[in-house]
Structures are given as structure tokens and as C-alpha cells.
Amino acid sequence: MESAKADQTDGAGPEGQHARPGGVANRTVPGRAMNSFSPADEEKFRGVRRMKLTATGLLLFVAVVYVLAKWAGNSGAGAWTGYVAAAAEAGMVGALADWFAVTALFRHPLGIPIPHTAIIPTKKDQLGVSLGEFVGENFLSRDVVRHRLRAVGIGSRLGTWLADPDHADRVTAELATALRGALAVLRDSDVQAVVGEAINRRADAQEIAPGIGKMLEKVVADGGHRRVVDLICVRAHDWLVLHNDQVMDAVQGGAPGWTPRFVDKRVGERVYKELLRFITEMRDMPAHPARGALDRFLTDFASDLQSDTDTRARVENLKREVLGRGEVQDLIASAWSSVRQMIVSAAEDERSELRLRVRASLLSLGARMATDAKLQAKVDGWVEGAAVYVVTTYRDEITSLITDTVAGWDAEHTSKKIEAHIGRDLQFIRINGTVVGSLAGLLIYAVSRALGA
């Protein structure tokens, strides 16, 4: 009783096409997975066709039984023929009713456009919207997501997984690969521009003179500058000892031209000796007056850096001038290149300190997460919060993926694809309808006969 179109056998269509189940050529449309039949779909539809033949055969069987029972009853075969005819008649009614119901899901029965038939092809878009709403309300709700994630226990499972050394090695290797990839993508010029901009913005936003003044004040108070003064005095003494001729030549060269040369020489020697004596005493005497004067100067300068407006303004101008020089930007670029090469080398070396520390940190984190209930609860809360945010923020986009995808499917082909997947079970409805109808008809006829007697 199925339509002829639905019961046609598979056949080869024109080149580049395959015959759809039902005799309709199937073109594969890019981007529409539902518009193509896979070999598994073809096999399922052949199973549907076999079940259709079985259900239709059972209908024909009860029809033949009905005809034979009526013929036998008219021939005087006995009262039993009435029971058989009633059962067969009810079986035919049940089979036809269920055939109509099953067929109406996918097409118009016998090709007649009866209202409320061909439900799937005509209501495909509405079904897609309903499916999207169903998924959104029952699977993408805040409570459902939290309940399911809490039942999974992500924190505990993740901790147990990370505590395994093999897994920690795997994560470390993946992180190293990701780090190398990220560094390979970054261009030196971009990093230099970003770092330079960040430094300039930070420097402009904060005045450095008071901070330098406080640091200098603390250094002087702690006597930390004395080692620097000691080093300068030692180096200055050594330089004067090695370059005495140059010092005297410099003094003589600055003398007036009318003075005798021997006078210039004596003056040069005197200046050199006094200068050498002064540096030697300053080097050897921690309480030298010059050292005290230097301490007072540094103390006053530290105070001016914090409170004197003119000094602070000069430091700010010097800061901007230094940061604006090309040499500073080149220093940033060279420093970044060195740091990047160092990080890449450490990421590639399995025994580098970087990878060993990352691995140890992962193992430690895994062990804590596997045993620390508070940490597990915190991780679970983070995951639940992130998942709930994604679900509540993008639920409409997620459900629209379902509705838009269903709306893009070909109606007739979608109907046949669904039929291929569930049609075999639906044919059992026809078979059950035939059997149940026959039994119901037999029972009704028997009760009627009993009451009539």
C-alpha cells in the first residue's frame, strides 16, 4: 500500500549522481551534510524497504484470510468463519490506519495532499526551532550545567591526571611547543614597539625623581655608597700613578705664555703631588673631610629629588630625553632578542631548568588537586563559572546553530534521511497494528456473539 515512488528499488542515476532511496537522484551539495546518503544510510534504507514489504505482506495476508473466511462462511462451513473474518477485518483496519499514520510522517499517502500529512517535510523548520528550544531549555540551562559539572568532579580528576609523571611530561611538552610557536609568531619590531610604548607610558604616568631620592637617601644612610667611593678613589689613585706625565702636561699647557718653562714645570709637579696626596688620603682615611662633604652633598641631593621642584623637573626632562634616544630602543630590541632566544632554547631542551621547573610545578599542582578538597572546590567553581558564562551568554547562538542547520537542509531529502534511520522501527507499528487489530476484532466479535446469545 506504500506509494510507488517510495517502493522503487535503488538504481544508478546519471554520472556524478546516485539514486536516492525512493528513486530520487541525490546530489551532494557542499556544506549540507544532510543532502548526501552515505553507504550506511543506503544499507539502513534497504532494511526499511524490507520491513515495508513485510508489513505490506502481512496486510495482504489478513486480506486474503478475510476473503477466504467470508467465502467459507457463505458456503456453510460453520460459525468459526465469522470469528476468523472479524479478526481479519479488524487486522486490515489496524494495518491501514497505522500505514496511514506512518506514511503521513514522511509524505502524502498515495500522493494525495491530505491536510496534516507529510509532517516532516512541511514542518521541518518548525521542528528545528522546537529542537533548538528543547536543547536550550533542557541542556543549556544554568542549573543543568552546574549539576553535571559538579557530578563530574573536574578538579579531582584533573589533579589525578596531572599527578601522573607521563601526563605531566606530555603537558610540559605541549606547553613548550605552544611557547615556541607563540615566540615564532611574534616579530621583534612589534615587541620592541609594545615594550617601548609600555615603558614610555609607565614613565610618563609616574614621576621618578622622588623614588630615586628615597632610594639615594636610604643608600647614604646605610653607608652603601662608601664602597663606590672607595672604588673610585682606588681607580683614581692608580690612574694618577700611571699617567703623571699627562697630568703635568695638562697643567703646563694651561699656563700663561709669558711664564718661564721651569716655573710651569715646577707648578705642574706641585699640582700633581697635591692631587696625588689628596686622592691617597681620601682613599686611606674613611673620615676624610672630602668624604664627609660628599655624604652631605648626596644627602642634600636626595632631599632635593624629593622636595625641590626645579630638581624634579630637570630629572623628568632627562628621563624623557633618555627614553627618546634611539640607543635605548635598540637596547630594548637587543634585550628582547636575547630573552627570546634564551626562552626558545630552554623550551626545546627537555632537561632545561625551565622545563624541569614547569614539570615539577605540574606534578605538585596535580598532587594538591588530587587530595586538597578546598582546591578541588575552587577549580570546580572556576570551571562551572566559565561554563555557565558561556552557556548563558551564547545560548542563543548555540541553539541557532541547530535551527539554522535544520533550515538549510533539503526538506524531501531530510525526510528520507530520517526515515532511513527510524523507518524500520516505524514499520513494526504497522505489524503490531495488524496483530493487535486482529485480536481486538476477534475479542469484540466474540463478546458480541456471547451477549447476543
Image (cartoon, helix red, strand yellow):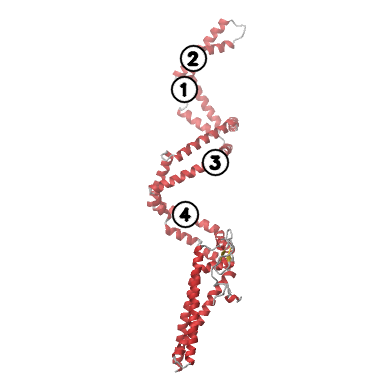
The kind of residue on which mark 4 rests is: Val
Between discs 3 and 4, the one toward the N terminus: 3
Q: Which image quarter is the C terminus in?
A: bottom left
The residue mark sitting in front, 2 or 1, is 2
Q: Which residue is mark 1?
A: 231
Q: Are marks 2 and 4 in contact (CB under 8 Å)?
A: no
- Residue at 46 percent of width and 45 percent of height: 175
N-terminal of the two: label 2 or label 4? 2
Q: Are marks 3 and 4 in contact (CB under 8 Å)?
A: no
One can see residue 138 in this view: no
Between 230 and 308, the one lying in front of the other is 230
Q: Quadrant of residue 80?
A: bottom left
Q: Nearer the viewer, mark 1 or mark 4?
A: 4
Q: Earlier in the sequence, mark 2 or mark 1?
A: 1
Q: Nearer the viewer, residue 254 or 144?
A: 144
Is residue 254 left or right of 425 when viewed as pictured? right
**Label 2 to label 4, Cα distance in Å?**
72 Å
Q: In whole angstroms, how far apart are the C-alphas of marks 1 and 4? A: 58 Å
Circles 3 and 2, Cβ within 8 Å, touching? The answer is: no
Q: Residue 56, percent across and down?
A: 50, 77
Q: Nearer the viewer, residue 26 or 140?
A: 26
Q: Nearer the viewer, mark 3 or mark 4?
A: 3
Q: Is residue 304 above or below residue 255?
A: below
Left or right, 415 with respect to 76, comes to right
Query: In terms of image quadrants, where is residue 316?
Result: top right
Residue 34, image x and y in percent?
55, 63
- Tell us which disc is closer to us: 1 or 3: 3
Residue 73 showing in the rendered view: yes
User: Which three-letter amino acid code belongs to the residue tagged 1?
Assistant: Leu
Q: Which residue is mark 4?
A: 383
